[in-house]
Amino acid sequence: AQTVTQSQPEMSVQEAETVTLSCTYDTSESDYYLFWYKQPPSRQMILVIRQEAYKQQNATENRFSVNFQKAAKSFSLKISDSQLGDAAMYFCAYRGDNFNKFYFGSGTKLNVKP
Amino acid sequence: ETGVTQTPRHLVMGMTNKKSLKCEQHLGHNAMYWYKQSAKKPLELMFVYNFKEQTENNSVPSRFSPECPNSSHLFLHLHTLQPEDSALYLCASSQVGWGRDINTIYFGEGSWLTVV
């Protein structure tokens, strides 16, 4: 089975600074999708950004961007100009050939300091 | 308004009770999921339904019983639960197929379950 590893249980960043959250995954598949989800204290998981493995270009969504290294099986999330509202749990997720299975990491808690 | 709604948001039940969690998706998706989220653990996939047919049962104990009457509604029936079943239960949906928004999973706000 695929595994998704987030090695940073908790991180802190100063408001307006940049922070990078790490994610690695293990797979033998060549086509797959990778996601970052945000879970604020309200508990609803919200999609932040999505990356198709066949695309070499890194996905970006406003202040959020990824560094996708397919050979290294690494998928990090960079948050620029951090805001207080970015404080949340961030989950990395993988979806491969099995449409029904999304594998999630254990999450990284991001604190944003004013 | 969220595309996936879950009720109740909070539930406290005794080990001998029978209760149900309800999920409804308004996104026109064809797949629905139940996940369990416990503290400091990865999300655990419990059940998956595709076009109302159960396609995944991730070794979930029989005290959890899912029901999917149509592609928009999903239930999780609970009976004789254990205290270790206390967790946040997340419902989600996705569209399996082709298109821009395909292959992304959308979550509800979750149902907090406490078993006493």
Image (cartoon, coloured by chain):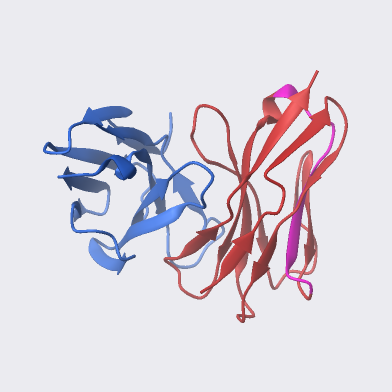
Chain colours: A red, B blue
- Residue B33 screen position, x and y as percent: 35, 54
Quadrant that contains the N terminus of chain B: top left
Count every numbered label the image shows and give the total.
0
Is A83 one of the magenta-colored residues? Answer: yes
Quarter residue A71 falls in = bottom right
Give coordinates of residue B79: x percent, y percent: 14, 45
Residue B6 point in image, percent of width and height: 32, 35
Relative horizontal placement of residue B61, taking residue B106 as reference (left or right): left
With respect to residue B30, does A108 lie above or below?
A: above
Q: Residue at the spot x=62%, y=81% of the render?
A: A28
Left or right for A42, reference A36 = left
User: In this rendering, would A100 be left or right of A22?
Assistant: left
Q: Residue at x 73, y 60 (%)?
A: A75
Range of magenta residues:
A72-84
Look at the image and say whether residue A66 sits in the magenta stretch.
Answer: no
Decide: is B9 above or below B28.
above
Quadrant showing the C terminus of chain B: top left
In the foreground, B28 or B81:
B81
Residue B51 seen in render? yes
